[in-house]
Image (cartoon, rainbow, N blue to C red):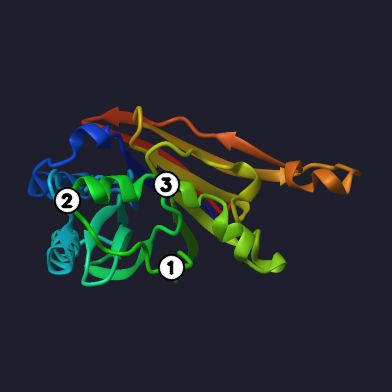
Amino acid sequence: MLEKKLKAGIIIEDTPSLMGFNERKLIRRISRYVSTGLDILVGPEWLFMPKEKLYSKSEKDSLVEEIANTTKDYNSLIMPGSIMWEDDSYFYNTAPVITKGKILGEYHKYFDGGSSTYAIDRGCKKLKYEKKQQGIYPWQDYKLGVEICADGGLLYCRLPEEERQSFDFYCLISSGSTLFKRHMPLKIGGYALNSNGADPYSIVVKKECWKENKNPRWVANMWDYEEIKPKKEFNKLHVYELNMGC
């Protein structure tokens, strides 16, 4: 693959204090961020959370469609954080994956990690999650893995051995958990991106070369990761430059 530079933006927002914020304003922010020329945008867990209830399925679908429609003119990969919603049987903590006005998929958080507390506080009496998502998506010529907070590392552990070092990007949408470097399914030169809504911050790392280590017990430590610093910081957005194919 020829060298290509991508711009990635990570939303910096204290989601526990943001709950109940006007979602239309959030959608306008996302659209404005994407219009600056971002190739990738990642938001934190619980960016979309009603203050006194959960979104219904129709409300959630409408919200995701509005994000898709307002960014349809851009070839950006958009993971706008997670959304808490419920249907007739379950409640969900869901991260949509969007590009060019299309919804590539929706990743439902597998482990609870505080989701049930927020659901109960909002009067939800439904069952827990429908656990069937694997969080793997294609985008352009790249392979993407997505997880939410407490799920971090689950995707890696469930993959066949030959696929555990095959992803170009791994995105962790969280509010507390950070990157677990031993269990990120990245190829050499791949990037992991974390938008964390608890004490809000961003982390981006690049997987570096193989290190010689003769002790097979420590095979998971044989990779180096370079932490990437943001090129710009403005309006609650950190912007990173990702050098692909080098």
Label 3's element?
loop
> Cβ–Cβ below 8 Å for labels 1 and 3?
no
- State the residue in front, 176 or 139: 176
- State the residue in front, 21 or 42: 21
Left or right? Give the position of 53 relative to 219: left
Left or right? Give the position of 14 relative to 240: left
The earlier-in-sequence mark between 1 and 3 is: 3
Q: Which residue is mark 2?
A: 31
Q: Is residue 2 above or below residue 234?
A: below
Alpha carbon of mark 1 to alpha carbon of mark 2: how far? 30 Å
Label 1's element?
loop
Q: Position of residue 87 (x, y in %)?
A: 22, 69
Q: Which residue sits at x=39%, y=43%?
A: 174
Q: Which residue sits at x=81%, y=43%?
A: 218
Q: Which residue is mark 3?
A: 113
Q: Nearer the viewer, mark 3 or mark 2?
A: 3
Looking at the rendered image, the quarter that the N terminus falls into is bottom right
Alpha carbon of mark 3 to alpha carbon of mark 2: how far? 29 Å
Q: Position of residue 7 (x, y in %)?
A: 37, 45
The earlier-in-sequence mark between 1 and 2 is: 2
> Cβ–Cβ below 8 Å for labels 1 and 2?
no
Q: Residues within 10 Å of mark 2 (few under 14, many from 20)?
A: some
Q: Nearer the viewer, mark 1 or mark 2?
A: 1
Q: Position of residue 188 (x, y in %)?
A: 65, 51
Alpha carbon of mark 1 to alpha carbon of mark 3: how far? 14 Å
Left or right? Give the position of 50 relative to 93: left
Judged from this view, the residue extending furthest toward the front is 125
Q: Amino acid at mark 1?
A: Lys
Q: Which residue is mark 1?
A: 131
The earlier-in-sequence mark between 3 and 2 is: 2
Q: Amino acid at mark 2?
A: Ser
Q: Residues within 10 Å of mark 3 (few under 14, many from 20)?
A: some
